[in-house]
Amino acid sequence: MAEKLWKGRFSEKTAPVVERFTSSIDFDRRLYRYDIEGSIAHCRLLARAGILTPEEEEALIDGLNRVRREIENGTLAFDDTLEDIHTHVEARLTELVGKASPKLHTGRSRNDQVALDLRLYLRDVVDEAVRRLEDLQRVLVRLAREHFEVLLPGYTHLQRAQPVRLAHHFLAYVEMFARDVARLLACRGRVNVLPLGAAALAGTAYPLDRAYAAELLGFEGISANSLDAVSDRDFVIEFLAAASICMMHLSRFSEELVLWSSSEFHFIELPDAFATGSSIMPQKKNPDVPELVRGKTGRVYGHLLAQLTMMKGLPLSYNRDLQEDKPALFDAADTLLSCLEVFGQMLPGLRIRRERMEAALRSGYLNATEMADYLVRKGLAFREAHHVTGEAVRLAIEKGCELNELPLAELRRFSKLIEEDLFACLEPRSAVERRAVVGGTAGPAVQSALEAAERRLGMAGEGDG
Ligand code: ARG
């Protein structure tokens, strides 16, 4: 059994059940790269402060790099009695370099070490999530361009409401994902702060140059309070909140893909490579990928709530409860990244059933607002126009036809303002093109939104060809 880091103070051995219960190696081993990167920076600090000789510094850094290679090759065995990744790295380092190794922990505690590892890890996760969100937005922008002239019903209350461009619908998700990126980047600023130097809680007693450490590790700031530095997990919670909102967006999108690929809508078909069949019903093609994205959203919300609850009763500063941050954070990060990846790869293969979308515009009185607006243009007050149109809709429902199928003479019974030119206004495309306001669904408005998205995503020129 390995010796404990705290063996000096204890006369009894740790109970095996406690070893298993407190061990975090099963999950925190994935921090090994960051732990070693942080330890290398710490070696440089110790050498700069004259605590390590240049020879010791080089021996330790060589040793740390060897430990990293052993972990990467899978030759280093992990073991509960060594508790966590920090202890594993140090124990193996001692075997490799001998007497300089115990000096590595001078002026440092696992409390500032684990905060450091977690920040380095999360910084990489945020950068990867931003990359994937930008890829996904590019995919949507390309779809919007490709299907620029396709119209479909826009819905409120899941009832057909007014016709919109499919491109406008896709660009709505681009807006959501752009906000997700902004949230992640704001969170990144608070992740990217160096905790090293806080030591256990009160600050290190050695003259360590923290600014130099921040520079070595690419941190933008240095924690201003050591108690806060070892016990702050706001950055984890902020990430979980940003991840939850992003998952919510992916889940709404998933719900639409599930609906749209059903026989009831049949607006789209998912690529075969991204759908699954049934073991019993030969005709089935199931949207399991969007269903699973929707299903996994709950897990990420759960992790956010778990972390808020885990933190709420903690007195300053470090408490072991904080170890629970890692399984939650890792699972949320893995879930978010995999959902973004699968979405980005699935969407380009989407088959758009334009004929089905446009056929759906032909029934459901999506042009009722157009008739009211027509009457307003002819001088009627909107309330009155709404009422007149409502009566016409009722008549059409009774007759089992659409507004534009009512004869002009019948329509004129409701208002003498109605003339032959009404019918052109009732066409879905003219309804769409009248919505020319900034942020609307008319061609020029969507075109400028597309161009703005392309500029933001560095795609300028792609649409010219
Ligand atoms: N496994 C611990 C964690 O994740 C590392 C820090 C341990 N510190 C301590 N004082 N026991 O928080």
Image (cartoon, rainbow, N blue to C red):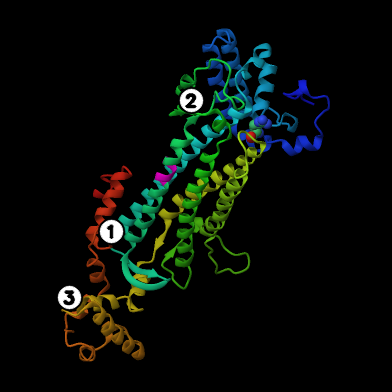
Q: Amino acid at mark 2?
A: Leu
Label 2: few (<14), some (14–19) or many (≥20) C-alpha neighbours in 10 Å: some
- Provide the residue designation for mark 2: 217
Please identify the residue farthest to the front as the structure is shown.
315
Q: What SS does tag 3 mark?
A: helix
- Provide the residue designation for mark 1: 439
Stretch in magenta? 181-185
Q: Does 431 appear above or below 243?
A: below
Q: What SS does tag 1 mark?
A: loop
Label 2 to label 1, Cα distance in Å?
A: 43 Å
Q: How many marks?
A: 3
Q: Residue at x 54, y 54 (%)?
A: 297
Label 3 to label 2, Cα distance in Å?
A: 65 Å
Q: Amino acid at mark 3?
A: Arg
Q: Earlier in the sequence, mark 3 or mark 2?
A: 2
Label 3: few (<14), some (14–19) or many (≥20) C-alpha neighbours in 10 Å: few
Q: Does 165 appear above or below 336?
A: below
What label sits on residue 377 in the rendered view?
3
